[in-house]
Image (spheres, helix red, strand yellow):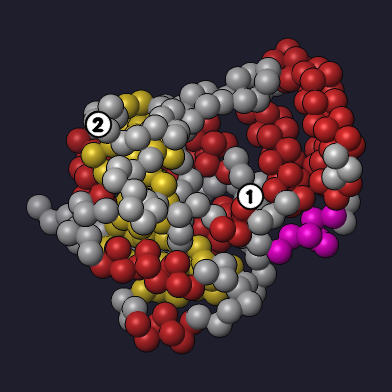
Amino acid sequence: MPNPLVSIITVNYNQTAMTCALLESIRRQDYAPVEVIVVDNASREDSQKMMRTRYPEIKYVRSERNLGFAGGNNLGLLEATGRYLFFINNDAELTTGCLAKLVAWLQETPGSGIVSPLICYYPLEGQLQPIIQYAGMTPVHPITARNRIIGQGEIANGRFEHPQATAYAHGAAMLVPREVLEKVGPMTDGFFLYYEELDWCERIRRAGYSIWVEPQARVYHKESMTVKSLGSLKTYYLHRNRIYFMWRNHSGIRLGLFYVYLWTVIVPKTVIPMVLHRKWTNLQAFWQAILWNFGAKDNGWERQNRFIA
């Protein structure tokens, strides 16, 4: 029986060289057939001609406005025809056999709705053993809205060898069967940045599917250089979407307890250090994030500051 077609979707924003490194790693995979879809999220760089020339096998889609992480991936879905959908960050690279191992896991595991590989930080020069970024996640706590990434910062020495059920897949690399997408729908693009895949996994779990990490498949992640330099925008979306995630996935007493925790712990714990260190731009971003969730969604701040993917 022939292998099912896998649609590989990645989103580029002003990182053409990184995206090309990803495409080279895809070319080295031993799995076929695949179709590769590159979504350009309104980059200032004009990479279309170069990418189409160097990688004639790809489908290149350009958005004239920045749609964010979920929005960019969802635009790519319009071009995807595969039985499986592999969402991969453009600042990641696949190791040998990664895609084949992920597909095999989904095919051999009834009820599995989404699977991520073991994700390691991209090794530095002279580094002997890779460092783990993700080997699974714990659930988001219903009151504090916090969770933990399993294995983060550990040396990849073989402790994580076997597939494990996990609370959430990792947005840097995740494989989903089309039937799951058709049942639960795509990621919600209202987040723009952060928490999209956590929210999606909650919906996938409520639909009756399990979520897994397959450590025999490995991806090296360079992390987002853009996000590292965001400053106030990172502050804004992390806090905005932490609250938005809780509102979308909890109700009643649980949501009420979270709001109590928000105002009595999160707000003072965040505001006081910002005031003491005079981080006025981050403070403004934090308050705009709070206001967005309490009735001021059209606050103008996002329109002025939304410039990355």
Left/right of residue 259 with respect to residue 95 in the rendered view = right
Instruction: Give the image location of residue 272, x and y in percent.
Output: 87, 30
User: Is residue 81 left or right of 287 when viewed as pictured?
Assistant: left
The residue segment tinted magenta is: 301-307
Q: Residue at x 37, y 51 (%)?
A: 123
Above or below 35: residue 282? above
Pick the quarter of the image with the C terminus: bottom right
Q: Nearer the viewer, residue 257 or 151?
A: 151
Residue 253, percent across and down? 73, 12
Residue type, label 1: Leu
Residue 159 position by quadrant: top left
The answer, for residue 297, to whether it is visible in the render is no
Q: Quadrant of residue 241?
A: top right
Residue 262 vs 134, above or below: the answer is above
Is residue 306 within the magenta segment? Answer: yes
Residue at screen point 42% across, 60% down: 9
Q: Main secondary structure of the magenta part?
A: helix
Which of pointers 2 and 1 indicates the residue nearer the eye?
A: 2
Where residue 208 appears, as percent x and y from the top left, is 42, 27
Q: Which mark is residue 193?
A: 1
Which of the numbered marks, if any, corresponds to residue 220? Answer: none
Q: Residue 306: x and y, percent?
A: 74, 60
Label 2, on which residue?
A: 158
Label 1: element kind:
loop
Relative height, residue 46 to residue 292 (above, below): below
Residue at 50% x, 63% y is 11
Q: Is residue 56 visible?
A: yes
Q: In the depicted view, which residue is nearer to us: 223 or 70?
A: 223
**Image point (73%, 51%), residue name:** 231
Circle 1 packing at 10 Å, graded few (<14), some (14-19), many (20+), is many
